[in-house]
C-alpha cells in the first residue's frame, strides 16, 4: 500500500514538474521575460509536491504507532495493570493481528487485535487521503503563484543546498550516535571494573566472566584479574608492528618504482594489479594466513628446530602486511608523483642521478605525505579483525615472540560478542570498552595522519 | 672562441618534429640570447645542451652538439659529468624544500667536491656571494629556501647552479616570474657571471635580450632564422621575419 502511494507521489512529482515547465513556456510565449529557466519552474513545483508528502509521511511514521497504542490500551486502563504488563498485552495484540501469536488467546486480546486491525486500516486510508489532498493543495497553490517574475531559482537552489546538508548531517550524526552508544556502555563497564585494572592489568580471561550465572548478584571482586587489557593491547600493537614491517618497505619501494622508474606502460598495468590486493576480502586473507602461511611457518620452524605455533603472530601480521601493501604503495605513489617536476629538473640539471634525486630531493619532499599514508596503514592494521581472528589465535598471551600466538582487541571483541549476550553484563560491556579504546587509538592516528598530509599540501600549493 | 658548436640538430617529440636542422655556434664568456615566439623551440634547444631532454621519454635528439669539441650526444658521454659542467636555471624558481645551505651544497655534495665541512662552507659562501645573495641571507642559512622572495629564490637557484663551477650556464626565461627590480638584479648578475661562465639565456623580452646579450639567435617554428651579434640582429637584421619580430609585428 505504502509502495503504491509512494509511486503515485513520485508520478505526481513528475507531473507537477511538467506542468510547472509548461506554464513557464506559456508565459514565455507571451513575450514576457522569465526570471529563471523554465526547468526551474518545473523543479519548483516538484518540490512543492515533495515537501508536504515528506513532512506528512514522517509525522505519520512518528505518531501513528503511539496513537494506536494509546487507543488500544485505553481499554485496559483503570484495571490496575503495570506498565510492563500493558506493554506485553500490546505486543500480544500486535502478534495476534499478524497471525503470529502462539500462546493462549483470551477474548480480551482477540478483541484488541480486531480493534488494532481496524485502527490500522483507518489510519492507512486517512493517510492516503491526507497526503494526496495536501500535495494537490500545495501544488495548486504553487502553480497559481507562478508568474513571469516569481522567484523560482532561489528556492530550488536552497532546496538542493538543504538536501545536501541533510545528507552530510546524517553521516555525522551516525558517527556521533555510535560514539555515544560506546561511551555509555563503557562507563557502565568501568563502574564494575576499575579503569586502573583495565589499563594496567596483565591478565585477560573473559572466559571467567562467561560462567557467571546471571541471576546471581554482581560481585566485582570475582572479576579481578579478568579484564586486564595489557596483553591484548600489546598483541594488537605487536601484530600491527609485524604487519608494518612487511608493508612499509615493500609498499614504499613499489610506490617509488611505480612513480619514478616504471615506464608508462608498466605503470598502466602494474598499478591496477597491485590495487587488486586491496580488493581481496579480508576473510580470504584470513584463511590464506590460517591454512597456508601458518602451517608453512610451523613446518619451516620445526625443520629448523624452532617451536612455532600454528597460529602465530608472524603469520597473521605477515599476511596483514601484504593486505596493507597496496594502501601504502598507491598513496605514496600519488604523493611522489605530485612532487613538482621542477624539483626533479632542478636536481637532474645539477648532475644528480635518478637515485640521488629520489633520495635527496623527492623523498624528503614527499615525506610528510608518505608518513600520512603509513599512519593510515597503521590504523588499518590496528582495526583489522578477520585475519587475526582466523590466524592468530584467541588466547591473550602477553608475549613478544612472533612465533607464539597472541590476540588483538578486535579479535577479543569478536570472541566476546559471539553467542548469547546479556546487556548490562560486564562481559558484554567489555566489548564496548575495547571498541572505545580502539576507536580512540585509530582516531588519534587518523588525526595525526590528516594533519601531516595537510601540512604537506600547504607547502606545495 | 667557440665554446659550443651545434650541427644539424633535429628534435622530435614522438613523431612531431620540434627543431629542424639547427646549427649554431656559441662564444665563450659571452651571453647568447635565444629569442622567438612561444613554442618556437628555443627552450627545447636549450635543454639539448645539457641533455635535459633525456628526462622526457618521447623526446629524441639527432645531430651533433660539440662542447669543447666533444659530442655530447655521443654514447660515451657521461650525463652526470656533462651536467656538472653545464648548469641550468629554470623559468620558475625551483629551490629544493631544504635549507638555503643544503640547496647550495647540493651539487658539491653529489659531485664530492668538498673534503671537509670548512671547504663546503667556503663553496656555499662564494657561490652565494657570486649570486649577490650572501648579504641578504648570511644570517639565515639554515632556514628553508622556499621562504625567500621570488627574486631571492631565483638568485638562490643561480647560486646552486654556480656552486659546482660550471663552464656554461643555461637560463630558461629566468626572469619571467619576477618583478622589474628582481629582474634588474638578475640581469646585473648575468653581466657579472659572464666573466667566468658562458651564458645562454632564453627570453621573451627583447629588451632583456638587447640589454644582457652579445649574441642573439632568433627561432621561429622550430627553425633558427637568424643569428649573429645582438647589435646586428636588433639594428639591421638580414631576414624579414626577424625584422618583423623585433619590431613587434608578430609574436
Image: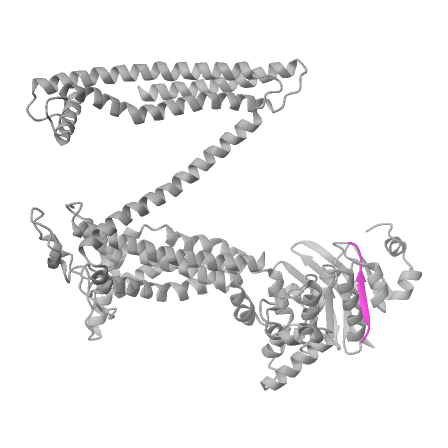
Q: Which residue is drawn at 49% across and 14% down?
A: A140
Q: In this view, does A396 lie above or below A165?
A: below
Quarter of the picture holding the N terminus of chain A:
top left
A422 up-or-down from A46: above or below: below
In magenta, the rendered stretch is B29-37
Tell me which residue sits at (35%, 60%) in the image.
Answer: A322
Residue A304 pos. (x, y %): 22, 75
Answer above or below: position of B76 versus A200.
below
| Residue A167 shown in magenta | no
Residue at (37, 60) in percent of width and height: A378
* Residue that lies at the very extreme toward the right in this rendered image: B236
* Nearer to the camera, A69 or A167: A69
Please name the colour scheme applied to the rendered image. one colour
**Which percent across, then down, holds residue A413?**
23, 53
Occupied quadrant, residue A437: bottom left
Q: In this view, does B69 lie to the left or right of A270?
A: right
- Expressed as whole percent of the image width and height from the top left, the position of residue A27 reads 62, 15
Going by the image, does B165 lie left or right of A327? right
The quadrant in which the C terminus of chain A is found is: bottom right
- Percent position of residue A154, x then y: 56, 28
Residue A324 appears in the figure: no
**As rendered, which of A351 and A410 lies closer to the eye?**
A410
Of residues B118 and A373, the one nearer the viewer is B118
Choose top left, top right, bottom left or bottom right for residue A10: top left
Identify which residue, A298 or A51, lies in the foreground. Answer: A51
| Res. A382 visible in picture | yes
Kindly indicate the quadrant of the structure image that contains residue A371: bottom left
Q: How many marks?
A: 0
Q: Does residue A232 appear left or right of residue B148 in this picture?
A: left
Amino acid at each position: 500500500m505504502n509502495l503504491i502511494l509512494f509511486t503515485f507521489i513520485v508520478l505526481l512529482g513528475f507531473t507537477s514538474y511538467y506542468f510547472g515547465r509548461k506554464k513557464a513556456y506559456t508565459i514565455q510565449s507571451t513575450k514576457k521575460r522569465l526570471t529563471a529557466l523554465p526547468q526551474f519552474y518545473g523543479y519548483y513545483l516538484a518540490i512543492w509536491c515533495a515537501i508536504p508528502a515528506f513532512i506528512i509521511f514522517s509525522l505519520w511514521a512518528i505518531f501513528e504507532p503511539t496513537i494506536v497504542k494509546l487507543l488500544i490500551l485505553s481499554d485496559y486502563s483503570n484495571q490496575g495493570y503495570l506498565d510492563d504488563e500493558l506493554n506485553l498485552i500490546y505486543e500480544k495484540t500486535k502478534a495476534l493481528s499478524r497471525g503470529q501469536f502462539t500462546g493462549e488467546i483470551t477474548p480480551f486480546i482477540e478483541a484488541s487485535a480486531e480493534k488494532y486491525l481496524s485502527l490500522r486500516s483507518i489510519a492507512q486510508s486517512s493517510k492516503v487521503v491526507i497526503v494526496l489532498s495536501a500535495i494537490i493543495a500545495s501544488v495548486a497553490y504553487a502553480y497559481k503563484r507562478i508568474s513571469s517574475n516569481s522567484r523560482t531559482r532561489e528556492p530550488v537552489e536552497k532546496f538542493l543546498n538543504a538536501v545536501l546538508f541533510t545528507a552530510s548531517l546524517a553521516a555525522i550524526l551516525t558517527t556521533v550516535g555510535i560514539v555515544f552508544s560506546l561511551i555509555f556502555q563503557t562507563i557502565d563497564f568501568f563502574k564494575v571494573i576499575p579503569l586502573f585494572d583495565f589499563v594496567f592489568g596483565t591478565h585477560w580471561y573473559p572466559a571467567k566472566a562467561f560462567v557467571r550465572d546471571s541471576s546471581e548478584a554482581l560481585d566485582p571482586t570475582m572479576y579481578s584479574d579478568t579484564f586486564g587489557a595489557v596483553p591484548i593491547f600489546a598483541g594488537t600493537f605487536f601484530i600491527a608492528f609485524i604487519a608494518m614491517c612487511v608493508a612499509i618497505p615493500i609498499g614504499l619501494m613499489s610506490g617509488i618504482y611505480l612513480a619514478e622508474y616504471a615506464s608508462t606502460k608498466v605503470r598502466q598495468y602494474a598499478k591496477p594489479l597491485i590495487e587488486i590486493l586491496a580488493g581481496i576480502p579480508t576473510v580470504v586473507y584470513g584463511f590464506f594466513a590460517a591454512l597456508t602461511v601458518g602451517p608453512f611457518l610451523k613446518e619451516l620452524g620445526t625443520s629448523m628446530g624452532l617451536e612455532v605455533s600454528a597460529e602465530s603472530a608472524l603469520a597473521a601480521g605477515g599476511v596483514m602486511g601484504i593486505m596493507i601493501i597496496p594502501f601504502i604503495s598507491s598513496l605514496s605513489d600519488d604523493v611522489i608523483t605530485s612532487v613538482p617536476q621542477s624539483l626533479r629538473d632542478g636536481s637532474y640539471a645539477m648532475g644528480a642521478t635518478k637515485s640521488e634525486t629520489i633520495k635527496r630531493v623527492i623523498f624528503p619532499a614527499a615525506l610528510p605525505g608518505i608518513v600520512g599514508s603509513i599512519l593510515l596503514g597503521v590504523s588499518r592494521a590496528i582495526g583489522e579483525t578477520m585475519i587475526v581472528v582466523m590466524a592468530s589465535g584467541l588466547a591473550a598471551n602477553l608475549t613478544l615472540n612472533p612465533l607464539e600466538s597472541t590476540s588483538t582487541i578486535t579479535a577479543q571483541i569478536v570472541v566476546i560478542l559471539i553467542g548469547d549476550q546479556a546487556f548490562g553484563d560486564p562481559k558484554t560491556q567489555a566489548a564496548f570498552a575495547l571498541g572505545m579504546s580502539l576507536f580512540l587509538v585509530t582516531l588519534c592516528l587518523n588525526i595525526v595522519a590528516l594533519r601531516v598530509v595537510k601540512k604537506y599540501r600547504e607547502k606545495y600549493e | 672562441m667557440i665554446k659550443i658548436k651545434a650541427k644539424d640538430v633535429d628534435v622530435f617529440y614522438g613523431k612531431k618534429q620540434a627543431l629542424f636542422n639547427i646549427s649554431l655556434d656559441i662564444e665563450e664568456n659571452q651571453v647568447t640570447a635565444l629569442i622567438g615566439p612561444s613554442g618556437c623551440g628555443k627552450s627545447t634547444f636549450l635543454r639539448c645542451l645539457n641533455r635535459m631532454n633525456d628526462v622526457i621519454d618521447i623526446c629524441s635528439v639527432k645531430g651533433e652538439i660539440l662542447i669543447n669539441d666533444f659530442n655530447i650526444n655521443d654514447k660515451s658521454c657521461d650525463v652526470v659529468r656533462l651536467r656538472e659542467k653545464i648548469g641550468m636555471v629554470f623559468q620558475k624558481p625551483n629551490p629544493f624544500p631544504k635549507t638555503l645551505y643544503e640547496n647550495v651544497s647540493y651539487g658539491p655534495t653529489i659531485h664530492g667536491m668538498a673534503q671537509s665541512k670548512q671547504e663546503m662552507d667556503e663553496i656555499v659562501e662564494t657561490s652565494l656571494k657570486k649570486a649577490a645573495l650572501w648579504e641578504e641571507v648570511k644570517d639565515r642559512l639554515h632556514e628553508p629556501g622556499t621562504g625567500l622572495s621570488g627574486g631571492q629564490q631565483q638568485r638562490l637557484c643561480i647560486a646552486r647552479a654556480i656552486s659546482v663551477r660550471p663552464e656554461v650556464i643555461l637560463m630558461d626565461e629566468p626572469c619571467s616570474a619576477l618583478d622589474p627590480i628582481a629582474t634588474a638584479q638578475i640581469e646585473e648578475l648575468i653581466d657579472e657571471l659572464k666573466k667566468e661562465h658562458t651564458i645562454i639565456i632564453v627570453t621573451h623580452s627583447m629588451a632583456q635580450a638587447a640589454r644582457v646579450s652579445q649574441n642573439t639567435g632568433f627561432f621561429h617554428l622550430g627553425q633558427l632564422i637568424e643569428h649573429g651579434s645582438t647589435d646586428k640582429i636588433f639594428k639591421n637584421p638580414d631576414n624579414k621575419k626577424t625584422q618583423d619580430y623585433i619590431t613587434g609585428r608578430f609574436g
